[in-house]
């Protein structure tokens, strides 16, 4: 059911930017791209979302390509506490979020 | 203040028993959800309630029954528990708007059926 494709894992050095890619080539014009993360077995944590413009908040930046078929989540200065599974989600229908397998980000000292 | 809370955090029970998990949100949201995360870590939506009305009911055994006494609460009752029901159950809430509906998740309830 998931409409997104993410790499299964990525490594990042502490203090460096982490760039997490996501492909959503079948996204519809009114569908938003959401990013969540899950640390260990805690509840998923909202990070950011966007429709077509780039977005930035205190946690991260979201870059969406002009054709909207892919996006990149950027954590500008990764810390060890950012180690988690990151989910890219396209909102598929009213209220339905489909979580795929996500990207396991390993931040290393 | 905890935005979305669940009780209990851990639940260990025998096959065949009936159990309930409670969820409360203090965000003033109009929509609440139950998700199940199995041992393979896939997170799947089970139910969604909007203003106390069921709006999403995925393919879930009818042993699972959500109940929403008011907008701030969505409880999950499970009858005749089976081994395969062992999982982490997450509650979430959101406020639907024209800018999408960001969902906020609770800490989860780890259910173990023996």
Image (cartoon, rainbow, N blue to C red):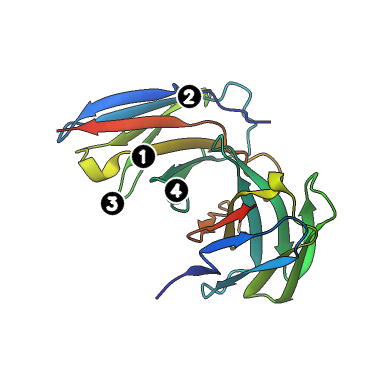
Q: Nearer the viewer, mark 4 or mark 2?
A: 4
Q: Callout 3: residue from which chain?
A: A
Q: Which residue is located at x 17 percent, y 31 percent?
A: A16
Pointer 1 with pointer 2, Cβ within 8 A:
no
Q: CA distance from mark 1 to mark 4?
A: 10 Å
Q: Is residue A83 left or right of residue B100?
A: left
Taking the view exactly as shown, the residue that stands out farthest to the right is: B62
Q: Residue at x 22, y 41 (%)?
A: A80
Q: Which mark is residue A6?
A: 2
Q: Residue at x 63, y 23 (%)?
A: A26
Residue A22 percent location from the top left of the image = 46, 26
Marked residue chain, label 1: A
Would you name the residue on which mark 3 appears?
A58
Residue bearing mark 1: A84
Along the viewing direction, whichever of A93 and A5 lies nearer the viewer: A5
User: Percent x, y for residue B89?
Assistant: 60, 54
Q: Going from the N terminus, do you reach mark 3 or mark 2 first?
A: 2
Chain of the residue under label 4: A
Front residue of A22 and A81 = A81
Which chain letter goes with mark 2? A
A62 left or right of A75? Answer: right
Which secondary structure, mark 4? loop
Relative to A33, does residue B49 appear above or below in the rendering?
Answer: below
Circle 2 crowding by C-alpha within 10 Å: few under 14, some 14–19, many from 20: some
Position of B83 compared to A57: left or right? right
Which of marks 4 and 1 precedes in the sequence? 4
Disc nearest the viewer among 3 and 4: 4
**Which one is nearer the viewer's eye here, B68 or A65?**
B68
**Residue B28 at what x, y percent from top left?**
56, 74
Mark 3 or mark 4: whose residue is earlier in sequence: 4
Q: Which residue is mark 4?
A: A41
């Amino acid at each position: 059911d998931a409409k997104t494709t993410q790499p299964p894992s990525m490594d990042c050095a502490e203090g460096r930017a982490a760039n997490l890619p996501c492909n959503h080539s079948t996204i519809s014009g009114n569908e938003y791209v959401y990013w969540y993360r899950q640390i260990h077995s805690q509840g998923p944590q909202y990070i950011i979302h966007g429709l077509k413009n780039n977005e930035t908040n205190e946690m991260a930046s979201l870059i969406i390509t002009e054709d909207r078929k892919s996006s990149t989540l950027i954590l500008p200065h990764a810390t060890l506490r950012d180690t988690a599974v990151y989910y890219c989600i396209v909102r598929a229908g009213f209220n339905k979020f489909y979580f795929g397998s996500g990207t396991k980000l390993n931040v290393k000292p | 203040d905890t935005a979305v809370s669940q009780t209990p955090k851990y639940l260990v029970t025998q096959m065949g028993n009936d159990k309930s998990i409670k969820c409360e949100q203090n965000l003033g949201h109009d929509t609440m959800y139950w998700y199940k995360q199995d041992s393979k870590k896939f997170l799947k939506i089970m139910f969604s309630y909007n203003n106390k009305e069921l709006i999403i009911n995925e393919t879930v055994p009818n042993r699972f029954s959500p109940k929403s006494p008011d907008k701030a609460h969505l409880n999950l009752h499970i009858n005749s528990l089976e081994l395969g029901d062992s999982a982490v159950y997450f509650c979430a809430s959101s406020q639907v708007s024209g800018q999408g509906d960001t969902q906020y998740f609770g800490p989860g309830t780890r259910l173990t059926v023996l």
